């Protein structure tokens, strides 16, 4: 389902929503940028974000910012946990998606579509806004 985040129904009225998906504008092609969003799991079951496909980037990686010893560092992770009955906000200093090697310039106001793949909820087509802030 395409839109600013209505997801598929998981069971008797239980829904996973993807909202406020956005990326920053980019004048250059071939750069890496974070994809940020809010994922609301209104179900009693945990889920996991497994994969992201955006036609305007060659690759997407799931990242977390590790605050171990020393300065914070991004590291790639196999999935992003989506706890039950909670909203998970993907942001630069926490869990987020890095879109690698953009294929086009990204202009403020543009709306693009990405496929967000979850372990249980399946694929949700999500509209992504190019914006300077959410």
Image: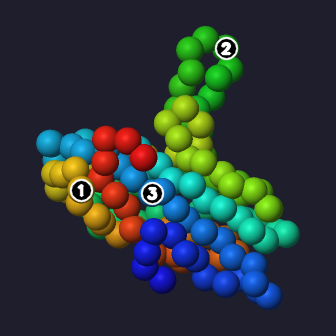
Q: Quadrant of residue 59?
A: bottom left
Q: Secondary structure at mark 1?
A: loop
Front one among 59 and 122: 122
Question: Of label 2 and label 1, which has the lower sequence position?
Answer: 2
Q: Which-is-in-front pick, marks 2 and 3?
A: 3
Front one among 121 and 76: 121
Q: Does residue 101 appear in the picture of this structure?
A: no
Q: Would you name the residue on which mark 1 appears?
A: 109
Q: Is 95 displayed left or right of 20 in the figure?
A: right
Q: Are marks 2 and 1 in contact (CB under 8 Å)?
A: no
Q: Rounded to the nearest whole Å, what is the CA distance between mark 2 and mark 1?
A: 39 Å
- Residue 112 location in percent, x, y? 30, 66
Is residue 15 positioned above or below 37 on the image? Answer: below
Is residue 27 positioned above or below 49 on the image? Answer: above
Q: Would you name the residue on which mark 3 appears?
A: 21
Q: Which-is-in-front pick, marks 2 and 1?
A: 1
Q: Rounded to the nearest whole Å, what is the CA distance between mark 1 and mark 3?
A: 13 Å
**Residue appearing at x 74%, y 68% in the figure:** 42
What scheme was used to colour the molecule? Answer: rainbow
**Residue appearing at x 66%, y 71% in the figure:** 16
Front one among 111 and 105: 111
Label annotation for residue 32: none
Label 1 crowd bin: few (<14), some (14–19), many (20+), radius 10 Å: few
**Residue appearing at x 57%, y 55% in the figure:** 38
Q: Is 110 displayed left or right of 121 in the figure?
A: left
- Residue 54 location in percent, x, y? 36, 64
Residue farthest right in this picture: 44
Q: Would you name the residue on which mark 2 appears?
A: 69
Q: Are marks 2 and 3 in contact (CB under 8 Å)?
A: no
Label 3 crowd bin: few (<14), some (14–19), many (20+), radius 10 Å: many
Question: Of label 1 and label 3, which has the lower sequence position?
Answer: 3
Q: Secondary structure at mark 2?
A: loop
């Amino acid at each position: 389902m395409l839109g600013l985040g209505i997801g598929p129904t998981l069971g008797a009225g239980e829904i996973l929503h993807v909202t406020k998906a956005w990326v920053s504008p980019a004048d250059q092609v071939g750069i890496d940028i974070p994809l940020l969003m809010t994922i609301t799991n209104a179900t009693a079951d945990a889920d996991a974000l497994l994969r992201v496909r955006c036609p305007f980037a060659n690759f997407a990686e799931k990242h977390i910012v590790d605050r171990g010893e020393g300065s914070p560092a991004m590291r790639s992770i196999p999935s992003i946990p989506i706890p039950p009955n909670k909203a998970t906000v993907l942001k630069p200093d926490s869990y987020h998606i890095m879109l690698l090697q953009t294929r086009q310039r990204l202009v403020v106001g543009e709306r693009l579509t990405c496929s967000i793949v979850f372990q249980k909820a399946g694929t949700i087509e999500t509209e992504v806004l190019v914006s300077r802030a959410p």
